[in-house]
Image: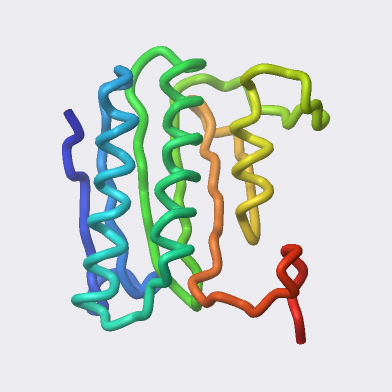
């Protein structure tokens, strides 16, 4: 079960408008818990901070978190840490785990069964970063809060 690490609002850290973190023991149950934690966080962003959170963001961010936490559970033995933050019109989801091996996105292959999580994350995010830490690694995915009009094919219209 996840253990809350911290939660800060507007008066908290200056780097984010609102943020929250939770630690998990690394078992498969934490994947669903991380999705629920993320949905609750986004609901609080709307209710407490008064920021609009679209249906797209309510679907995309839990999916991104689910993929990142799934990889942490699958490839790292031990705990993982999920941090969520909203700042400057984005939601930043960061997952730390104890495995120092950095993930590598595989080439697209419609015939491959499985191992598409990182492809999905990278396709849905505005930005994606991987950093090796003294112990393990930290993966950050950034999703834009605002919906942008598109032409129906995923291309932004300006």
Residue found 26% across the figure and 45% down from its top: 36
Residue found 21% across the figure and 59% down from its top: 7
Locate residue 100, reporting x and y percent.
57, 22
Question: Where is 33 relative to 40, above or below?
Answer: above
Question: Where is 41 relative to 131, above or below?
Answer: below
Quadrant of the image containing the C terminus? bottom right
Locate residue 33, reporting x and y percent.
25, 36
Residue found 71% across the figure and 69% down from its top: 152
Instruction: Name the residue nearer the viewer: 24 or 138.
Output: 24
Q: How is the image coloured?
A: rainbow
Locate residue 70, reporting x and y percent.
45, 27
Residue sticking out furthest to the top: 77
Q: Judge left or right: residue 35 versus residue 138.
A: left
Instruction: Name the residue nearer the viewer: 88 or 56.
Output: 56
Count of numbered marks: 0
Question: Where is 45 relative to 110, above or below?
Answer: below
Quadrant of the image containing the N terminus? top left
Q: Judge left or right: residue 103 versus residue 31.
A: right
Write down the quadrant of residue 110 in the picture: top right
Residue sticking out furthest to the front: 152
Locate residue 101, reporting x and y percent.
62, 20
Write down the quadrant of residue 108 in the picture: top right
Residue found 38% across the figure and 61% down from its top: 85
């Amino acid at each position: 079960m996840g253990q809350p690490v911290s939660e800060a609002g507007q008066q908290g850290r200056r780097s984010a408008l609102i943020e929250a973190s939770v630690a998990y023991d690394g078992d498969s149950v934490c994947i669903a818990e991380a999705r629920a934690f993320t949905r609750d966080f986004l609901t609080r962003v709307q209710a407490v901070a008064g920021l609009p959170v679209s249906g797209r963001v309510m679907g995309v961010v839990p999916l991104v978190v689910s993929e990142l936490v799934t990889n942490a559970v699958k490839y790292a033995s031990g705990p993982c840490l999920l941090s969520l933050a909203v700042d400057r019109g984005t939601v930043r989801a960061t997952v730390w785990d104890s495995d120092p091996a950095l993930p590598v996105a595989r080439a697209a292959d419609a015939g491959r069964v499985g191992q598409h999580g990182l492809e999905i994350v990278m396709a849905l995010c505005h930005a994606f970063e991987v950093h090796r830490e003294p112990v393990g690694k930290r993966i950050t995915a950034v999703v834009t809060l605002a919906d942008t009009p598109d032409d129906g094919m995923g291309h932004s219209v300006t």
